[in-house]
Image (spheres, helix red, strand yellow):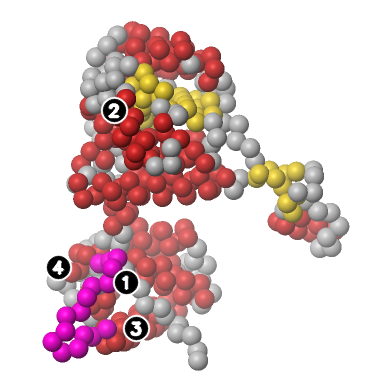
């Protein structure tokens, strides 16, 4: 029996990605970047006012040559016609017996199969808005931590954990050339021997690259930073498998080393215990005094030119701002890079005008927002 050409999906995002895979089978050069471009383009024109709008949008994003422009419409019609058949078949197979209620499947996601079918037939009612939102996770990743609804908290925690794990795996896969016969590097072997007519006369090897980079996190856990700091600490907790040398400190009115507590397997339990131990958690802020303590007690041991210091704070200092500037200068002189993530910087109107931020700014290499999941993805680029 022949395998079906089109597999039924239950979200518009999944169907668009499947459509891109379908185009690849037809000779189109459509990779992950083109898939992302197509989804971003759909988001830009949402909500759709006609099925033709999506077709034109995808054609503009995915058809790169004259030949592809000529064949795109036919392939588009073919794909969605097959999908429509799959939807009809599934709805028919899943119809309940007369008088029997159909139980919703566990983990079922909106939009439903019927919503897809209605949209394909030109439905412009309220369900259209559900179809336009191509990814609930994508929307959540751009949402400010401080405005999350209670129901979104756990979903955001899971999203942050997935981002951290994905970045940790990417870092763990890094490798470098090795003169010893460890792991065969097939790509470099083929490239080297192409000059010799393609015969494999010389083998190349690789070994996992060791991360010399060290990370020190100084995280503000005062009242104004409570929600933001919990998510960033979780993010750094997830990166521990990739970076062996991570030290985490939290501060409000005092500095507290949190590294040992965060090495527990259960992050939620570790954070709960930590919040009970740290003096002034969700209280006031004395950044200058806290950084002065770090500089005197830990800087000599932890900071060198391989160290990246990440500071997470809104810069509201109720203590000695002159001491903050002096401590930041010492930290900057010893560290390789100082990154300050400020959740308030997520607003386009934000200016670092507080006395604390003014004192610290001359000693910051990268000043960036730290208000949502997207800003944590950007942090990985800064670490490189």
In which quarter of the view is residue 231 placed?
Answer: top left
- Mark drawn on residue 276: 2
Q: CA distance from mark 4 to mark 2?
A: 47 Å
User: Circle 4 sits on which residue?
Assistant: 126
Say if mark 4 contacts mark 1, CB within 8 Å. Answer: no
Residue at 57% x, 26% y is 306
Q: CA distance from mark 4 to mark 1?
A: 18 Å
Between disc 2 and disc 3, the foreground one is 2
Q: Is residue 325 above or below residue 349?
A: above
> Mark 4 or 3 closer to N-term?
3
Residue at 27% x, 25% y is 281
User: Circle 1 sits on which residue?
Assistant: 10
Residue 303 position within the rendered picture, expressed as x and y whole percent measured from the top left: 53, 20
Tell me the element at label 1: loop
Q: CA distance from mark 2 to mark 1?
A: 44 Å
> Mark 2 or 1 closer to N-term?
1
Does residue 134 show up magenta in the picture?
Answer: no
> Mark 4 or 2 closer to N-term?
4
Residue 144 position within the rendered picture, expressed as x and y whole percent measured from the top left: 26, 41
**Residue 381 seen in this snapshot:** no
Residue at 20% x, 79% y is 102
Tell me the element at label 3: helix
User: Circle 3 sits on which residue?
Assistant: 86
Q: CA distance from mark 1 to mark 3?
A: 11 Å
Say if mark 2 contacts mark 3, CB within 8 Å. Answer: no
Tell me which segment is drawn in magenta: 94-110
């Amino acid at each position: 029996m022949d395998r079906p050409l089109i597999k039924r999906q239950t979200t518009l995002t999944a169907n668009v990605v499947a459509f891109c895979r379908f185009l690849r089978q037809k000779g189109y050069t459509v990779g992950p970047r083109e898939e992302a471009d197509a989804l971003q383009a759909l988001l830009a024109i949402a909500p759709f006012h006609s099925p033709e709008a999506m077709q034109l949008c995808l054609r503009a994003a995915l058809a790169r040559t004259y030949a592809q422009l000529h064949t795109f419409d036919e392939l588009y019609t073919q794909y969605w016609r097959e999908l429509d058949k799959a939807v009809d078949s599934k709805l028919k197979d899943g119809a309940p017996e007369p008088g029997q209620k159909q139980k919703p499947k566990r983990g079922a996601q909106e939009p439903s199969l019927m919503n897809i079918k209605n949209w394909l037939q030109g439905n412009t009612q309220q369900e259209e808005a559900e179809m336009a939102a191509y990814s609930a996770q994508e929307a959540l990743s751009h949402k400010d931590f401080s405005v999350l609804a209670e129901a979104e908290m756990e979903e955001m925690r899971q999203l942050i954990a997935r981002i951290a794990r994905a970045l940790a795996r990417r870092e763990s896969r890094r490798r470098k050339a090795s003169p010893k016969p460890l792991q065969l590097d097939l790509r470099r072997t083929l490239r080297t021997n192409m000059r010799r007519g393609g015969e494999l006369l010389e083998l190349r090897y690789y070994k996992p690259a060791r991360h010399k980079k060290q990370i020190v996190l100084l995280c503000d856990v005062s009242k104004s930073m409570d929600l933001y700091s919990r998510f960033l600490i979780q993010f750094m907790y997830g990166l521990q498998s990739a970076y062996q040398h991570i030290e985490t400190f939290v501060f409000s009115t005092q500095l507290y080393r949190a590294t040992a507590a965060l090495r527990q397997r259960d992050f939620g339990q570790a954070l709960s215990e930590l919040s009970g131990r740290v003096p002034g958690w969700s209280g006031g802020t004395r950044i200058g005094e806290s950084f002065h303590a770090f500089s005197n007690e830990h800087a000599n041991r932890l900071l060198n030119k391989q160290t990246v210091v990440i500071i997470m704070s809104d810069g509201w200092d109720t203590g000695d701002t002159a001491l903050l500037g002096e401590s930041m200068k010492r930290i900057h002189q010893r560290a390789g890079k100082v990154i300050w993530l400020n959740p308030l910087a997520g607003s386009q109107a934000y200016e670092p005008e507080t006395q604390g931020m003014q004192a610290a700014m001359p000693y910051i290499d990268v000043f960036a927002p730290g208000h949502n999941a997207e800003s944590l993805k950007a942090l990985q680029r800064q670490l490189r």
